[in-house]
Amino acid sequence: MNTLDENEVQTVEEHIKPRDIIVQTVGMKEMQKNDDAFYIINLGEVVRRFKEWQNVLPRVQPFYAVKCNPHPAILAVLAALGTGFDCASKTEIDDVMSMGVPVSRIIYAVPCKSKTHLQFAEERNVRLMTFDNEYELYKTKEIFPNAELVIRILADDPNALDPMGDKFGCDVNHTRHLLNVAKNLGLNVVGVSFHVGSFCGDASAYATAIGLARLVFNYASEIGFNFTLLDIGGGYPGTDNGPITIQDIAEKINQSLNEHFPVGCDVRIISEPGLYFVWSACTLTVNVIGKRLKEKETCTNKGAADDTVERTQKERSFMYYCNDSKHMSFGYILSCSNLHYAIVPTLLKPAQSNTPKFSSCIWGQTCDGADLIVGHCLLPELDIGDWIIFEDFGGYTMAVASGFNGFTAPICICMATQSVWSFLKPLLAKVTLLTKKM
Ligand code: PLP
């Protein structure tokens, strides 16, 4: 059995940080005259965040949302730690099962599924799945009548940076009707799910949503269902230093669970965190492959006493081109309005504090004229061949990379400190590593 081992992971001393590995990798690349972009995946960060989850949300079992970052090492580590998985397609189900994860740890969590993928779930006996509309019930009846259905309700946080309520989730007022349809079709509905939206902006949105879920549990028992599952979705923060922390959210969730689903109520509580586990675990390093100087003449003495003789000054700004793009790692973040703040370029070669800084922008490498990654930032003058680092870059980055223009995605280098590695290694022995390259 192929497992995640030392051939795939750089094991390092405790004091070594991702930035040290970046420096080392760049040194090697420069010797080999290779300027390709690359990711560092810090597996220790995934482990740390898992332990924090267990600490603050002990009643909630995480089912990692594979779509967020399906890198084989990340999936292997989470499988080894014992998380479940939220899958949205045949491939994701197949990948997770190929690692040896049992179906009891999989939820097929997309409310509208193609018949082919649903058929695949039936063949693999992946029973637990979400729905939010009547048509999905008829389709499920036809293809997978023994499915264990979870009704996804609308419980959006209006402040989430990537809300999903326009597309998914049925209004709570409509749930009685859907549950009656399911009952008449002889389908088995086992619980409620919701997703408050990615990058939740208001921790109390979870409490409100859990309260709504309680109402639906009550309707369900009136109709004759015995609900046993509550799925509190995704939307948790990917870093510890954002506007809302996992501790803020956990406090609200735990209070609301105690009120509506107290310990001993026989309801299994799961969640579907994506970026929570991977956002801060990955760092992207790109190369400056091109550069343009822009000079704008500005008049410096207009309106002054001596303005009969016009004096001008040249304002310099720079455009840089890097070897990633809006069609590769940056697509999702750029597509979320208000998330541009998450794209913070830092330099591998730190500049002296007195080095002049210029208005700069960073473009992607494709021929798309709208492939702008950073519209404005202040940077010292960079040279072609310099390296730019984007920290906290693991969520919906490499996962959404396309091969547009023939460019290939950055390679990934996995690291773990020796203590993390000795904790993980025995757990990883039970997990088959997927062979697909990312
Ligand atoms: N669950 C579902 C059904 C989703 O659609 C998503 C994200 O698209 C997630 C979970 C993960 O969300 P997040 O990465 O915000 O935790």
Image (cartoon, rainbow, N blue to C red):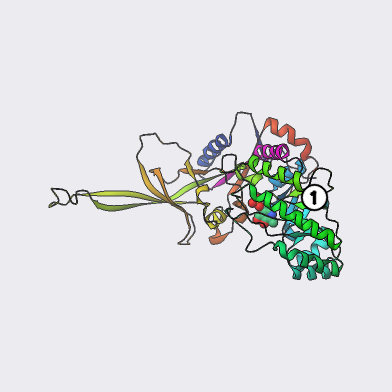
| Circle 1 Cα neighbour tier, 10 Å, few/some/many (<14 / 14–19 / ≥20) | many
Left or right, 292 with reference to 337: left
Q: Quadrant of the N terminus?
A: top right
Most common secondary structure along the magenta stretch: helix
Q: Can residue 235 be seen here?
A: no
Identify the amino acid type marked 1: Arg
Residue at the (77%, 55%) spot, across then down: 107
Is-magenta flag for residue 304?
A: no
Residue bounds of the magenta highlight: 36-58
Residue 341 in the image, given as x and y percentages of width and height = 50, 48
Q: Can residue 420 be seen here?
A: yes
Q: Which of the pair 100/207 is nearer the observer? A: 207
Q: Which of the pair 369/269 is nearer the observer? A: 269
Q: Which of the pair 350/127 is nearer the observer? A: 127
Quarter of the rendering containing residue 11: top right
Left or right, 92 with reference to 354: right
Quadrant position of ligand 1: bottom right
| Disc 1 CB within 8 Å of nearest ligand 1 atom | no
Residue 249 in the image, given as x and y percentages of width and height = 65, 44
**Judging from the image, what secondary structure is the residue with disc 1 in?**
helix
Left or right, 295 with reference to 135: left
Residue 92 in the image, given as x and y percentages of width and height = 73, 56
Is-magenta flag for residue 47?
A: yes
In the rendered view, would you say 336 is above or below 353?
A: below
**Number of marks in picture:** 1
Q: Which residue lies under the disc numbered 1? A: 105
Residue 414 in the image, given as x and y percentages of width and height = 64, 41
